[in-house]
Every structure is written in structure tokens, then in C-alpha cells.
């Protein structure tokens, strides 16, 4: 099969379609900055989806749970070996993605006789001193990119773009362009609405309906009824520990997301 | 990562990961017994005491090589995670490496397995690391004998109590021999070249003193530690004393229910002035007129 170039291209195309199909119904993950660091938000039927990788690095993924675990283990191993061989300050997201996760997922994607990682990954890094956050997203084919201020993992590329555009607009409207100044509660609400935009866009598929406040609120309420719960975590610069990662408690989420309850 | 054989057995084991990737130092082959060819930096007094609220761990600051003082501000008491402290006596190079591996092993385990390593697991990891170091120790160039102190909240579902202890506080002290055997100390533990000097004094005070060590308040415990370190410094050249003129203080950390705190130098200075006027025997001449 590989000796015929056309077949190879066709095989890759099939893989892409297969991956799109597997990932399209996943619950989106939204990441954005707030006054003390950065916030990650998604929904889940039960198992955890937001993880700590290193002191200042967090990880989220959509896709097959076993593949997500493999990728999570891979990046944790790389980060800790780096910390051991060099120092804690040498663990950088750019290196973890460029030389770690990116090539790993690309290799798996290229081996067309085996299954690729059925996953899209979002990793975020906090600068412990300065108000600066870095976000990377890595697609199942290993292509990665970083975005400033916010990042979204969506079931489809289109839905992620729509949510990211909305997040940018919200932030610009609410804080005059300063990305880092929103309190946590407000950041949670914005992230929740972005999540709904990504969800609605992915569900709509090709037809591009207008997404208004009413549909967003309905989408968030529907999620609660559908046995899903919100999961959110922060990398908080103000935590007096080496580790800046913290999962938000049910009470914190309850208070912040009260406006969306029926 | 080998995609064919995902590594389940080594999951969460940072040491295996390092060995797999070739980052773990290879045990050096044994030479025939005899005097080590290189002089090794060592010598210390470290001690750990249980007190009312937890555990105090302290160490002097001197590093020696034979008769030479190499360094007077060595840190021999290191925090490993949010509730454990390791104090080092022996060869600092190996001891720091072991402390580093231990710290990263615990972090790696917690993050990859999504749960804290149990106390038994942590103690076992340290034991393995000391065993790895055995060839070096046998050659006489790198023995490490740490004290490991931790605070474990008494849990409702167990009757776990510190051995022989009063049940007040849940501080625990462990020490190791060169081969990696682990022992739990009841109320105090001291190792290093200065330890034989103060061990008897500690036993005497614990048994016949006005108050058992484990019932002392923080201040009483600190005062006792400073006096013990001064005693060790008086008789052991490898243990450094308090030097007011160069502002060198022993290093003391406490672990209590609220976590690890480093006793600040300013507090130690006040304690010295209040309870040990005149400073240390060797600090005396330099410190006159302070």
C-alpha cells in the first residue's frame, strides 16, 4: 500500500476523517487568563479531565480516555526527567510540546497501520513571577500552535475558532484589552459561555445559526440535566507553594455559575 | 515511549524511569578495601526531636574535608514535600542527589498516579536510594545516613500512634543505616560525627529531665536544640557552632499540622542572647563585645 503514493495520501485522509468523527462530540475545553493566573474549564460525566503536569504546567485533553492517559503520562515523565537532569526552572512548555508531545503524536499519526492517538491536547503554562500565560493546543496529527491569552479545544476546528473569537471579544469588552485583569468568578462565567459557544457550533455542523444569549444559557442548563458536571482548575500565581495547580471546589463553581441555573 | 509495550509495571516509579532512560548513575565497581584515594567532604551533627506540636529537625552548617573546614553555610536540612523533611549527614554530594531524587519521585508519583504516595511508600523509596548508593558507601567515599521526619495526621480509621509516644501530635522520625535499613525513633534521633556527644545528654533529659522531650513547647524545644548543637560543636571539630560575628546560625525546621516552617535566623539570634549568652566557644573570641 505504501509503495503507491496515491494510496498513502488516501490512507492519511481516511485517518483524518476517522479522527474528526471520533472527536466531534467531545465536550470542549476552554482555557483563559484571569487576575491571578489562568483558568481551565470543561464538563465531564465523571472522570477527571484537567490535570497537573508540573509546578506551573496544566494539561487537558479530549478524546479516548486511554490515549489521554498515555499522553499525560508521557508529558509528566518528560517534565520530571527534565527537572531532575536540569532544574525545576528548565521545565518549559515550549520544550515539552516542541520536542515531546508534538513529535510523539505526529509519529503515531504517521504509522498508518496502527491506531493514532485519538486525542486533542491543550497545555497551559504560568509564569510564576510575571503576568504571562502560554497556551498550546496539539491536534491528533501532532500539529501544534500557541495562542496568547486564551485557547479552546473543540470537537471541530470550527467550533474551537468560534469560541476563541468570542473569548477574545469578551475579554476586550470587559477589561479594555487587558487580558490578565478579570476576577476568577467573571473568568469562570466567560469560560462557561465560551464552552457553550463551542458546543453549539460543533452541534450545528455546517449550518451556521446565530448563537445568542438565550441559546447559550439553555445549552449550559441542558448540560447540567444531562448528567454532566463542570470541572475547572486554576494555575494560581498567588498559591504559596511550588505547585500552582488547584482544582476548583464544587462550592466555588456553584457560586460563580449560579446565574445560569434555572 | 514504546507503543507496543506500554510500561504499566514502572508506572509512577520515577527511579525505574530514570534507569530506563539511562539517567541514573551507574553503581561504580568496588575497589579493594583500603584508605580512600580522595578526601571526602563530610562531618556533621544533625538531630530531630519530637515536641508538643510535631517534629523539629536541626543541623549545624559546617562541611569538612579531613581537618579542613570547606564551607560554613551548608544546608543540611531540606524539605522534601509539604510534610516531610530530610536531614543529611555523610557525603553531601550523594546526600543532595538522594534528596533531589526523593523530592522528584514524590512529585512524579503524585502527579502521574493522582494520589499522594503513602508514608510507607516514601520510606521505602528512600531505603532503595540508600541501597543504590551502597557501592559508594562501601568504598568509604560517599556514605549517606539521613534522618527523615514527617507529620502524619492521626486518622480516625486507624489507631496509628507514634511508637511509644504519648499520642500528642503525629510527628514521626525515621533514620537509616548505610545499607538502607529503616528504623523509627521514639522521641529523638541524632546522627553525624557530633552525635555520640549529645546522644547521652538527650537520653538523660528525656528520661530524667523536668519534661519529656515530646511534651516541650516550641520555644523549649528550640532552646534545647541550640544547647545540644553548641555541646556537639564544643567537642567535635566537624560540627560548626554559632558565630555571632559572621552571623552563622544552625538550620532548624519544624513540621506541624500546619506544615513546614523554617525557624528564622532573627528568632535564633534572640534565643541565643536569652539562653546561651556568650555564644559558642569558638565564636566567643570573635564575638566579644557584641
Image: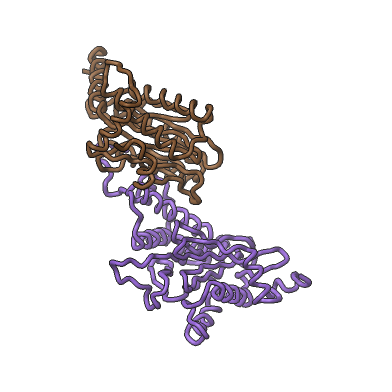
Chain colours: A brown, B purple
B283 left or right, relative to B27: right
Q: Residue furthest right?
A: B289
Residue A156 image point, x, y percent: 30, 23
Q: Is B50 situated above or below A121?
A: below
**Closer to the camera, A99 or B227?**
B227
B66 left or right, relative to A189: right
Residue A37 image point, x, y percent: 48, 39
Q: Is B193 situated above or below A21?
A: below
**Closer to the camera, A152 or B92?**
A152
Q: Residue at x 41, y 29 (%)?
A: A151
Q: Is B76 situated above or below A187?
A: below
Let me know if residue B40 appears in the view.
Answer: no
Q: Residue furthest front?
A: A262
Quarter the C terminus of chain A occupies: top left
Q: Is A71 situated above or below B71?
A: above
Q: Residue A200 sits in which quadrant?
A: top left
B139 left or right, relative to B156: right
Residue B238 image point, x, y percent: 60, 70
B194 left or right, relative to B269: left
Q: Residue at x 40, y 60 (%)?
A: B126
Q: Residue at x 44, y 61 (%)?
A: B84
Amino acid at each position: 500500500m505504501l509503495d503507491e503514493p496515491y494510496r498513502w495520501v488516501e490512507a492519511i485522509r481516511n485517518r483524518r476523517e476517522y479522527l474528526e468523527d471520533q472527536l466531534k462530540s467531545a465536550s470542549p475545553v476552554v482555557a483563559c487568563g484571569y487576575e491571578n493566573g489562568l483558568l481551565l474549564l470543561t464538563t465531564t460525566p465523571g472522570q477527571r479531565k484537567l490535570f497537573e503536569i508540573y509546578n506551573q504546567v496544566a494539561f487537558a485533553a479530549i478524546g479516548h480516555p486511554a490515549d489521554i492517559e498515555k499522553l499525560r503520562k508521557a508529558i509528566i515523565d518528560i517534565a520530571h526527567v527534565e527537572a531532575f537532569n536540569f532544574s525545576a526552572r528548565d521545565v518549559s512548555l515550549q520544550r515539552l510540546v516542541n520536542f515531546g508531545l508534538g513529535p510523539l503524536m505526529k509519529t503515531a499519526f504517521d504509522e498508518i497501520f496502527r491506531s493514532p492517538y485519538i486525542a486533542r491536547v491543550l497545555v497551559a503554562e504560568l509564569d510564576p513571577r510575571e503576568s504571562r500565560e502560554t497556551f498550546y493546543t496539539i491536534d491528533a496529527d501532532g500539529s501544534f500552535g500557541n495562542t496568547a491569552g486564551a485557547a479552546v479545544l473543540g470537537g471541530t476546528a470550527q467550533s474551537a475558532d468560534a469560541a476563541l473569537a468570542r473569548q477574545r471579544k469578551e475579554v476586550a469588552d470587559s477589561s479594555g484589552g487587558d487580558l490578565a485583569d478579570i476576577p476568577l468568578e467573571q473568568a469562570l462565567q466567560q469560560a462557561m459561555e465560551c464552552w457553550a459557544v463551542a458546543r453549539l457550533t460543533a452541534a450545528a455542523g455546517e449550518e451556521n445559526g446565530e448563537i445568542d444569549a438565550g441559546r447559550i444559557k439553555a445549552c449550559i442548563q441542558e448540560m447540567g440535566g444531562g448528567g454532566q458536571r463542570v470541572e475547572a482548575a486554576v494555575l494560581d500565581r498567588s498559591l504559596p507553594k511550588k505547585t500552582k495547580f488547584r482544582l476548583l471546589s464544587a462550592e466555588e463553581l456553584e457560586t460563580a455559575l449560579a446565574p445560569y441555573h434555572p | 515511549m514504546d507503543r507496543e509495550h506500554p510500561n504499566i509495571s514502572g508506572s509512577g516509579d520515577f527511579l525505574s524511569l530514570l534507569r530506563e532512560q539511562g539517567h541514573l548513575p551507574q553503581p561504580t565497581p568496588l575497589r579493594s578495601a583500603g584508605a580512600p584515594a580522595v578526601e571526602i567532604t563530610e562531618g556533621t551533627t544533625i538531630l530531630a526531636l519530637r515536641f508538643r506540636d510535631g517534629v523539629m529537625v536541626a543541623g549545624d552548617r559546617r562541611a569538612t574535608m579531613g581537618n579542613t573546614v570547606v564551607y560554613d553555610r551548608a544546608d543540611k536540612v531540606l524539605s522534601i514535600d509539604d510534610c516531610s523533611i530530610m536531614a543529611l549527614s555523610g557525603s553531601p554530594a550523594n546526600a543532595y542527589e538522594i534528596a533531589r531524587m526523593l523530592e522528584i519521585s514524590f512529585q512524579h508519583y503524585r502527579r502521574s498516579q493522582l494520589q499522594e504516595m503513602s508514608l510507607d511508600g516514601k520510606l521505602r523509596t528512600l531505603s532503595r536510594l540508600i541501597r543504590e548508593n551502597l557501592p559508594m558507601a562501601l568504598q568509604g567515599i560517599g556514605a549517606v545516613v539521613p534522618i527523615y521526619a514527617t507529620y502524619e495526621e492521626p486518622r480516625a480509621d486507624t489507631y496509628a500512634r507514634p511508637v511509644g509516644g504519648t499520642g500528642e501530635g503525629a510527628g514521626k522520625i525515621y533514620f537509616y543505616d548505610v545499607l538502607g535499613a529503616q528504623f523509627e525513633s521514639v522521641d529523638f534521633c541524632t546522627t553525624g560525627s557530633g552525635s555520640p556527644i549529645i546522644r547521652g545528654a538527650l537520653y538523660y533529659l528525656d528520661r530524667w529531665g523536668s519534661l519529656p522531650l515530646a511534651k516541650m513547647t516550641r520555644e523549649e524545644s528550640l532552646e534545647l536544640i541550640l544547647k545540644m548543637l553548641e555541646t556537639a560543636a564544643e567537642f567535635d571539630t566537624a560540627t560548626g557552632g554559632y558565630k555571632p560575628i559572621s552571623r552563622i546560625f544552625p538550620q532548624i525546621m519544624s513540621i506541624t499540622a500546619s506544615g513546614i516552617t523554617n525557624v528564622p535566623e532573627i528568632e535564633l539570634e534572640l534565643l541565643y542572647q536569652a539562653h546561651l549568652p556568650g555564644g559558642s566557644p569558638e565564636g566567643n573570641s570573635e564575638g566579644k563585645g557584641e
